[in-house]
Amino acid sequence: MKTKFVMLVLSTALAGVLAGFTLGCSQSTDTAGAPPASTTIGTEIDDSVVSTQVKSALLADPDIKGFDFKIATRKGEVQLSGFVDNQSQIERALVVTQAVQGVKSIDNKVSLKGAASTLGNKVDDSIVTTQIKAALLGDASIKSLDIAVVTRQGVVQLSGFVNNQSQIDQAIKVVHSIAGVSSVSNEMSIKK
């Protein structure tokens, strides 16, 4: 079992590294707003490793549910987002994240869940999330691979690091156009 977990962690890290290479090679030269601060491939790899280590630490902690968190890292700044059951899970996640080597700061964008979801809500939310991801991928002005999407009872949370405010505005506009979205929680940050 432990070997499967280690293989999962290593394959996730490799996927993050490959995504970093791909994203680093395909960065657009968007002129709307200030250009994003440049990063090196080494920094992107380091950030991918930090994200993977944070995810692993959250999964390994019995007091929190690691799968409820989305993790994005930019130059050592870790952005945690998602929905959790209670405040103690948020606080524990912050402690666990801060203990990971390479974490310089934490941007807490985690929200508390509202009422309990039904199976029907969960299925509907999955469909809405899939439609949102497809719509974001279809919009060339948005760097959608940098945006995490979580839906809970029609409330969509967008998080991650993007190049500029126009990408945030466009992403929110696209999400509002999807049927089943009741509101959008913008937790995205502009790359520094």
Image: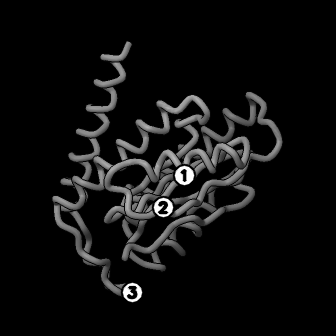
| Location of residue 9 in the rendering, given as x and y in whole percent from the top left corner | 32, 32
Disc 2, disc 1: CB below 8 Å? yes
Q: Which residue is mark 3?
A: 33
- Amino acid of disc 1: Leu
- Amino acid of disc 3: Gly
Residue found at the far top of this picture: 1
Q: Residue at x 72, y 41 (%)?
A: 85
Q: CA distance from mark 3 to mark 2?
A: 25 Å
Say the numbered circle drawn on residue 185. none
Is 153 left or right of 137, judged from the image as shown?
A: right
Q: Which residue is mark 2?
A: 106
Q: Secondary structure at mark 1?
A: helix
Disc 3, disc 1: CB below 8 Å? no
Q: Secondary structure at mark 3?
A: loop
| Location of residue 63 in the rendering, given as x and y in whole percent from the top left corner | 61, 33
Is 21 left or right of 66, judged from the image as shown?
A: left
Q: CA distance from mark 3 to mark 1?
A: 32 Å
Q: Which mark lies nearer to you, 3 or 2? A: 2
Q: Residue at x 80, y 36 (%)?
A: 116
- Amino acid of disc 2: Ile
Q: Which residue is mark 1?
A: 94
Disc 3, disc 2: CB below 8 Å? no
The C terminus sits in image quarter: bottom left
Is 79 left or right of 112, judged from the image as shown?
A: left
